Image (tube, rainbow, N blue to C red):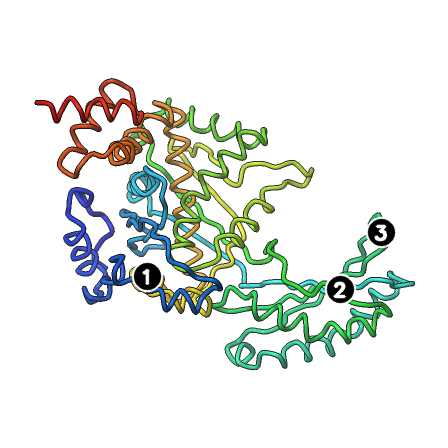
Amino acid sequence: MTTSRMSGFRNLSIDERRARIADTTGLEPQRLDVLSPDRGLSLDQADHMVENVVGVLGVPVGVATNFVVNGRDVLVPMATEEPSVVAAASNLARMTRDHGGFRTSSTAPLMQAQVQVLDVVDPAAARLRLLQAADELIALADAQDPALVEHGGGVRDIIVRVLPSSRQTYVVLHLVVDVRDAMGANAVNTMAEAIAPRVGEIAGGRTLLRILTNKADLRLTRVSAVFDRELLGGAEVVENMVDAAEFAVVDPYRAATHNKGIMNGITAVVLATGNDTRAVEAGAHSHAIGADGSYTSMSRFEKNADGDLVGTLELPMPVGLVGGATKVHPVAQANVAMLGVRSAAELADIVMAVGLAQNAAAVRALATEGIQRGHMSLHARNVAVTAGAAADEVDAVVARMIESRSIRTDAAHDILADLRSR
């Protein structure tokens, strides 16, 4: 790739944008043909993915520009129906370029499955018996997926917890599995099912649940970036952004919307690449619960010695390139090819960079003109189309609605009637 910096990209036609992407990424132009609704996911393909299929739902796929992640320029596909998300992420990514873009680090791709044991008469002793049998249980679990082991993955540890409840005291065994480039749900679930009978025998109880946990707190990705003070709008804007972000740290009501802004970026990339948005969202929000049990901000923003804004974000990021819709959905395949990623870890890095950029964009908007100005100007296009504006009428209707600050369907109808009467 030459550069992800694409000035004027939004002014190109869709065909011109695709041609530019193909030229920049080195992809064959026809590889992007599946992005057209009539060439994407077919009804026959959909019928093999889920049950009771009656159709498919189209979601806009935009491309975020300006991203540099770990020194590499990337164009990032984002699947979202919400206006301003793609543009906002691209704009804030631009403000990091002179400072090296986004830098990441990550842990190993460890996922966990839980085996719940009931009716144990000696829970503390059962815990020790299970730990003493760790080698046996690990070997049994690894035997379920020799291909994973062959590729360097497999069980890395066994953890056993004793959990008192209002019903009884449960003994819960965790399988900690390196899933390599997979999301890992199928692998760890299969392993948990296989070892459950033996776990019950050793613990002296009966097993009930054998399932992964989406609290993937051993599979973390971290990202940081420096956002240029002057490009943000100056020292006062930086100060206001730090205070706006700190509000989300200390108040769960603000944190809920603040974190939703992060997930606007993260979920869009996860969806575009055919990964499990619900698993990622569950892990992210559970990670936002602090040591004191309160819900808090996922991100942190500070001012560095030069007065620039420094943003950091650390979250579980269980995404994969092996299996699932990523390997079945033709549009997901094209989007992964556009990213040029070769590992799940590299995909997670980019997902997190977009989440941080989108978060910074929302905080900046809130700390300056307010979120509605930019968001509603883009939303106005949807309103105009809903009111029946033709392609050559949309711009004029949008301009009039913004000028009158009446971005409503009834206002759009009135403007259309006036334009057509002339």
Which residue is at the front of the view, 342 or 192? 192
Numbered mark located on residue 167 in the image? 3
Q: Spot the residue most to the left.
A: 422
Q: Is mark 2 on a helix, strand or loop?
A: strand
Q: Position of residue 18 (x, y in %)?
A: 19, 56
Q: In which quarter of the image is the C terminus?
A: top left
Q: Residue at x 61, y 53 (%)?
A: 215
Looking at the rendered structure, the kind of residue marked 1 is Val
Horizontally, residue 265 falls left or right of residue 161, namely left
Q: Where is residue 32 in the image (x, y as percent from the top left)?
A: 24, 62
Dot 3 and dot 1 residues touching (CB under 8 Å)? no
Amino acid type at image mark 3: Arg
Rate crowding at label 2 as few (under 14), some (14 to 19) or many (20 or more) other CA atoms within 10 Å. few
What is the x, y in percent for residue 40? 30, 62
- Above or below residue 102? Residue 28 is below
Gap in Å between the C-alphas at discs 2 and 3?
Answer: 14 Å
Q: Residue 71 carries which label?
A: none
> Quick one: 312 or 401, which is closer to the camera?
401
Count how many numbered circles sit on residues in the image. Answer: 3
Q: Residue at x 47, y 60 (%)?
A: 319
Q: Earlier in the sequence, mark 3 or mark 1?
A: 3
Percent across and percent down for residue 212 are 63, 62
Residue at image location 20% in from the left, 43% down from the top: 10
Asked which quadrant contains residue 251, the reply is top right
Of the two numbered discs 1 and 2 on the same chain, state the one appearing first in sequence. Answer: 2
Mark closer to the chain start, 2 or 3: 3
Identify residue for label 2.
Answer: 208
- Residue at left 50%, top 34%? 257
The residue that disc 1 covers is 331
Residue type, mark 2 in image: Leu
**Quarter of the figure with residue 361:** top left
